[in-house]
Amino acid sequence: MNGSPEAPERPIRAITRLMHPAKKREGEDTPYVEPRPFSPDCLRPRRTRFSFDLDDVPNYWVGGSPARTHLFNSINVFLVPFEEFMVRVLSDQGQRLDDPELRRQIRGFCGQEANHARAHQIFLDTLRAQGHDVDGFLHFADAMFSRVLERGLGRDLSLAAIAGFEHLTAFLAEFILDGEMLAQAPPALQELWKWHAAEELEHKALAFDLLRHVNGSYPLRIAGGALGAGIVFGFLGIGMALLFTEEGILFERRTLRETLELFFTRDKILTRSIPVMLDYLRPGFHPSQRDTRGMAERMFAQVELQVAEDVPRAA
Ligand SMILES: [Fe+2]
Ligand SMILES: [Fe+2]
C-alpha cells in the first residue's frame, strides 16, 4: 500500500496533503466534521478530524456482533485502495474535459473521496492495533484495483465500474443513515460512517454523469454496473471471510447465523440490493431519480447543530 520511498506521489496523497485537515483544538478528542449544507451541485470536501482510541473501540464494536463488525471492518479495508483508484481515474478523465463546470465537480468529488480514504486509513491503524492482519487484504485489493482494473480494463470501463460501484455505495449509504445498526457503535465510528454515507449521497450522480458525458454506451454502463456490484459484494465477502478465519470463527454457528441475518433475513443487505441493481438496468435510469436528499440533509443539519453546540463549550 505504501510503496517504496522512490515511488512517485499518487494523486490522492497530493490532494489529501493540500486539504489541510482541521487542526486539533486543545483538550478536544471528539470527532469533527466541518458543517456545510448538502450541496450536490457544488461538491466540495468537508474538513474532518477523527481519532479512534483503542480503549473506546471494542473488538466487536457494532453491537457486540462479529458479522456486523466485520462487515464494516471489511468495507473499511477495501475502501481505502478503491477510493484511491477512483481519484486516479476521475482525475485523469477530468483533465481531458473542456467543460469547466464538470471539471469543478470532479475536483470536488475527488476531494471528498480522498478525504474518505484518509479517514478510513486512520481506522486501519486501530484494526492493526486490535491484532488484525489487514495488510495482506489491503495489498491484494490495491493490486486488483490498480493493476487489473486500472491497467487492464481501460479508461472508460474503469469509469463505468466506478459509476456502478457508486450506485451500490449510495444504497449502502441509505442503509447506514436510515438504519439503527450503528446506534450502539462508538461515537467516533458513528460520525465517520454517517459523514461518509451523507457525502456518498451528495455526490452519487457524479461518476454516472461523467460516464454519460464521455461515453453514453448502454452496454458499457451495464458492464460497469455488473463490475461495480461484483467489486462491492466480492471484496466485502472476501474481507469478512478473512477476518472470521483469522479469529477462527468462520464455521461457528453464531457467525453463520449472524451472516445469514445480515445479508438475507434480518438486515437483508443482499436481498434489498437486488431491486436496486435491477433498477440500474433501466435505459432511462439516473441516480437522482431515487430521492435520498432528505436523509443526507438531516445528517448535515445534525453536524451543524453539534458544531454550534460545541462553540460555547470550547470557548
Ligand atoms: Fe467515499
Ligand atoms: Fe463515492
Image: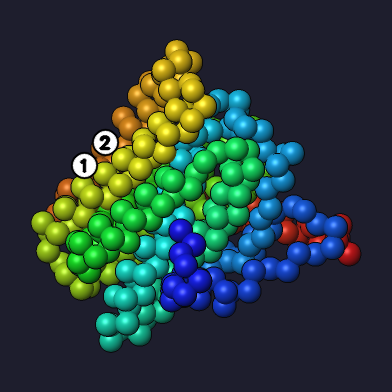
In the image, residue 4 sits, relative to residue 99, either above or below, namely above
Residue 33 location, quadrant:
bottom right
Q: Give 267 or 239, whichever is nearer the viewer.
A: 239
Task: Using the image as rendered, state which of residue 50 and residue 279 is in the foreground.
Answer: 50
Q: Which residue is mark 2?
A: 274
Q: Which residue is mark 1?
A: 278
Asked if residue 14 shows in the view, the reply is yes
Residue 220 versus residue 151: which sits nearer the camera?
A: 151
Horizontal relation, residue 311 to residue 73: left or right: right
Q: Residues within 10 Å of mark 1 (few under 14, many from 20)?
A: few
CB under 8 Å between discs 1 and 2: yes
Q: Quadrant of residue 271?
A: top left
User: Picture quarter containing residue 137?
Assistant: top left
Report whether 188 appears left or right of 96: right
Q: Position of residue 247 (x, y in %)?
A: 52, 27
- Residue displayed at 20% across by 73% down: 214
Residue 292 is at least partly visible in this image = no
Residue drawn at (73%, 59%) of the image: 307
Q: Nearer the viewer, residue 72 or 216?
A: 72
